[in-house]
Image: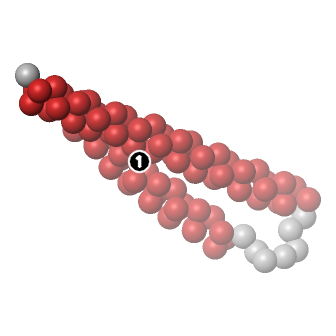
Amino acid sequence: MWKEDLYQKKAWLESFNNKVNHQLDEFYSTIPDSDLNDREQYLYDTAQNLFKMLYELTDHSKGIINAELMNIQDAVATRKNADTQI
C-alpha cells in the first residue's frame, strides 16, 4: 500500500511539473524581449525566481519519493533474503 501511494505521489508530481512547464512557457511568451521599465523588470525577475523555487521543491520532492521507493525495494529484498535463509 505504501509503495502504491508513493507511485501515485510521483505521478502527481510529474503531472504538476508538466503544468508548471506549460505555465512557464505561457509566461515567457507574454514578456517582451526588451523595453521593460524597472517595475516590469522587477516583476519579471521575481516571477522567474518563483518558478525556480517551484522547480527546486518538485525536484526535492521527487528525490525524497525516489529514495523512499529504493528503501522499500531494499526492505523487500532483505526480507526475501531472510526468508530464504530460514
* Left/right of residue 57 with respect to residue 3 in the rendered view: right
Q: Quadrant of the C terminus?
A: top left
Which is more toward the observer, 8 or 46?
8
Is 55 above or below relative to 36?
above
Q: Which quadrant holds the N terminus? A: top left
The residue that disc 1 covers is 13
For the image, the number of numbered tags is: 1
Residue 44 falls in which quadrant of the image? bottom right
Quadrant of residue 42 within the rendered picture: bottom right
On screen, 50 above or below 20? above
* Image-based side of 40 in relation to 23, left or right: right
Q: Find residue 45 and report its horizontal and vertical position in percent.
A: 78, 56
Q: Residue at 45% across / 45% down in the picture?
A: 62
Taking the spot 34% from the left edge, 33% from the top edge, the residue there is: 71
Horizontal and vertical percent position of residue 14: 40, 53
Which x, y percent locates residue 13?
41, 47
Q: Is residue 41 above or below residue 9?
A: below
Label 1 amino acid?
Leu
